[in-house]
Amino acid sequence: MEVPLPPFCAKLILRAIPYALSHRVLVMCRGYSEDIENFTELVWEDDKDLDFHDKETYPEFQLWLR
C-alpha cells in the first residue's frame, strides 16, 4: 500500500521508524538522486539532512507498507 505524505510527516515518520520495522514501513521519495521517474527508499541515518521542503528537488514522498 502506498500513502502520499507531506514533507513534514515524511521526515517525522522516517525518524520514528525503529530499525526492526524498517523492512515493513518505508518512506519513499521521488526525485532523489535526480531520479524523477522512480521512488527511492530513504534511511534516517543517511537522509536526516535532506531538505524535505524543497519541492523542486524532492517533489513527492510516500509511505509504503509491505
Image (cartoon, grey):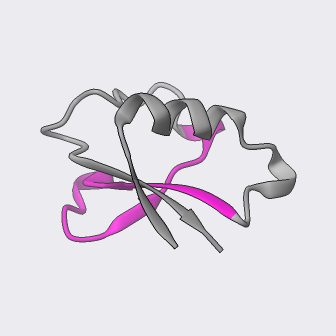
Q: Residue at x 59, y 58 (%)?
A: 26
**Which quadrant holds residue 20?**
bottom right
User: Would residue 25 be found to the left or right of residue 64 on screen?
Assistant: right
| Image location (x, y in percent) of residue 6 | 35, 38
Q: Residue at x 25, y 54 (%)?
A: 31
| Nearer to the camera, 3 or 29 | 3
| Nearer to the camera, 2 or 41 | 2
Figure check: 51 above or below 22: above
Figure check: 20 above or below 10: below
Figure check: 2 above or below 58: below
**In the image, residue 30 lies in the stretch drawn in magenta:** yes
Q: Residue at x 72, y 66 (%)?
A: 24
| Image location (x, y in percent) of residue 16 | 70, 34
Q: Residue at x 60, y 46 (%)?
A: 43
Quadrant of the rendering where the C terminus is positioned: bottom right
Figure check: 44 above or below 24: above
**Which quadrant holds residue 37?**
bottom left
| Image location (x, y in percent) of residue 7 | 37, 34
Numbered range of the magenta stretch: 25-46
**How many numbered marks, from 0 up?**
0
**Which quadrant holds residue 22?**
bottom right
| Image location (x, y in percent) of residue 17 | 72, 43
| Nearer to the camera, 63 or 59 | 63
**In the image, residue 31 lies in the stretch drawn in magenta:** yes
User: Would residue 60 be found to the left or right of residue 13 on screen?
Assistant: left
User: Would residue 55 be found to the left or right of residue 66 on screen?
Assistant: left
Residue farthest along the left direction in this orientation: 56
